[in-house]
Amino acid sequence: MMKRIIYIFLCLYLSLTGCLNDETTGAHLDISEFSTTLEDTLFYATSAETFKLDASKFIKQSIPDCPLEYTWSVGKIKSWNTTDKFWEIDSLSVISNEPVLMYRFKVLGKHLLRLKVTNQYTAYIQYFILNITSSYDEGPIVFSQDDEGHGMFSYLNCPQGIDTLFTRSAADFKYVTGTDEPILNEDIVDFAFYSGNQKYPDFNNQHLYLLSRKNKAAYAIDHYSLTTIPESVCQFSKTPLNLTLHWHSDVKDGNHDLFVFTEDGDVLSYCCPFRMEMKPVAFDTVSGWDRATVGGSRTSEDSKQLADILWLYNDKTSTIYGMWANDIYETMNGNKINDYLGPYTFEGEDIINAYFGRNYQYGMIMPTYNDLFIVTRLKSNPKKYMLHQWYGVSWGTNFIYVSNKPSASWPFERKEMSLTKNARVMSLPERDGKIYHNGKKVFCITGAAYPLEASMKHGKDVFDLATINPNAEITDICLFVRKEKGENADKHYVFVATYDPTSTEEKKGSVYVIAADDFANIVAKYENVAFKPLRIYYKNRL
């Protein structure tokens, strides 16, 4: 395709003919001449803010009563022609016909903005350079909703890294609302964000999706502007409730799949490389499941991001299933269309949850060589539990099935169990911990220990939200895993999103940051920065 190059001289001002003043005493016409009072031609804005420029404030004409028409056009600058001294752009697109330009630029970089003002006889053109930068390079992000279901992103930008985050306050948070991006108000029920590290297997990939129950669709979100990417809508045939994202960790080109757990207990997947929904091949004879949870472990020591597994439960038969990919992409290499786990049935037991942890048979800390833990409760005695453990689980293999019994099974008792059926358990091998919350407290299972008593006090392994706000509840947590070397190389953090229904503030949601090696150490508080949080993540810097 031939590229159309538009050559534009920034100092060009056209004043051709004018608004006419017909003086009847003779053949005399006065031309209304244009001028500008704005000398600035360079502006800066971020991708998350609405840029405003009022032409009526600086465009003047010698006959003030002449009616004017305004046309704002913009083009992405490709290069500067050093020989002839002009900017080269591919095209100009009209973005407004109002005197006041109100526009949000989503594409980073330099843009050429053209203002054309006309009346019936006169044309005047003025050019500006816009430098659009990111307002969100690194830092925590929360998706929350108010009582009417209106959604909002709250984020705190820390372009210099997480250590600068602790010098910021709640006033530094920025927001994107449904007014800025209407999809945020479309009955959003889940939010998934894969934010990777620079090395294998993440390769700097940033994948954000919002899941709309009403529209039966997952919307890809630009990680700089936090607005939808129109050409990347993933449509589903059933009503979705939960969303997980599987990143193909052996490739650099962004291939990934989506899984949704549906309202009728089914699972659908969307293969993004091929832009199509698929009915999973694994467990195709299963009519449905009672519930689903999300959990996983990192696929490399260099990764900062959990590779999620969708755990599926049939509570009537006490059977667990797992899915972690829907790889049409992988069929090119002769692998199965679906990577799957199980099924495995626990007779006489009620399955609580499943999670990964450090390999304890050989004392290895490699995230890719995990142990799997499945916690169950005896149906005959609700106070008695079992911790079933599989040693040395390789990522990407089916290691739980009928003939593959647990490596070990450990009985234990709890008066009140802290681990719930809907908890997402996050693995942090650097602390040798498995971290989760029950709505009131955040817990860390250290080593091969059993899940903790819910009554445990605030301390190294338990963060009790009541020590800060007894009226609030925990809605979600996420991890920051530091991979950079330096004096703070061993400092990792847990971000805790909370909601206080008794608050009189419009934003009843808050974020607290605790040290991963000591939950009693609260390192930062950002209060009243969200509605009711649905999900919280940390964006890693590219």
Image (tube, rainbow, N blue to C red):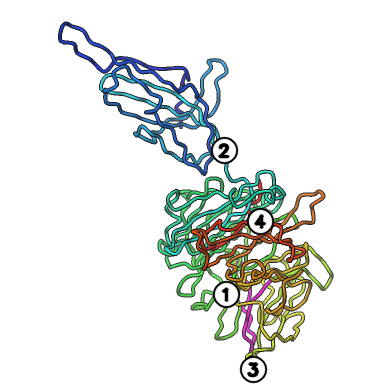
Q: Which mark is residue 133?
A: 2
Q: Earlier in the sequence, mark 4 or mark 1?
A: 4
Q: How far apart are the alpha carbons under marks 2 and 4? A: 29 Å
Q: Earlier in the sequence, mark 1 or mark 2?
A: 2
Q: Earlier in the sequence, mark 3 or mark 1?
A: 1
Which residue carries the number 3 mark? 380
Locate residue 94: give its quadrant: top left
Q: Earlier in the sequence, mark 2 or mark 4?
A: 2
Q: Which mark is residue 312?
A: 1
Tags 3 and 1 touching, CB below 8 Å? no
Q: How far apart are the alpha carbons under marks 1 and 2? A: 42 Å
What residue is at 51 percent from the left and 66 percent from the top?
260
Eye-nearest disc, 3 or 4: 3
Above or below, 57 against 163 in this view is above
Q: Quadrant of the C terminus?
A: top right
Eye-nearest disc, 3 or 1: 3
Q: How far apart are the alpha carbons under marks 2 and 3? A: 61 Å
Q: Is residue 347 magenta?
A: yes
Say whether residue 432 is left or right of residue 497: right
Q: Residues within 10 Å of mark 3 (few under 14, many from 20)?
A: few
Which residue, as the protein is rendered here, is positioned at the far top?
26
What residue is at 23 percent from the left and 10 percent from the top?
29
In what element is the residue under mark 2? Answer: strand
Which residue carries the number 4 mark? 249
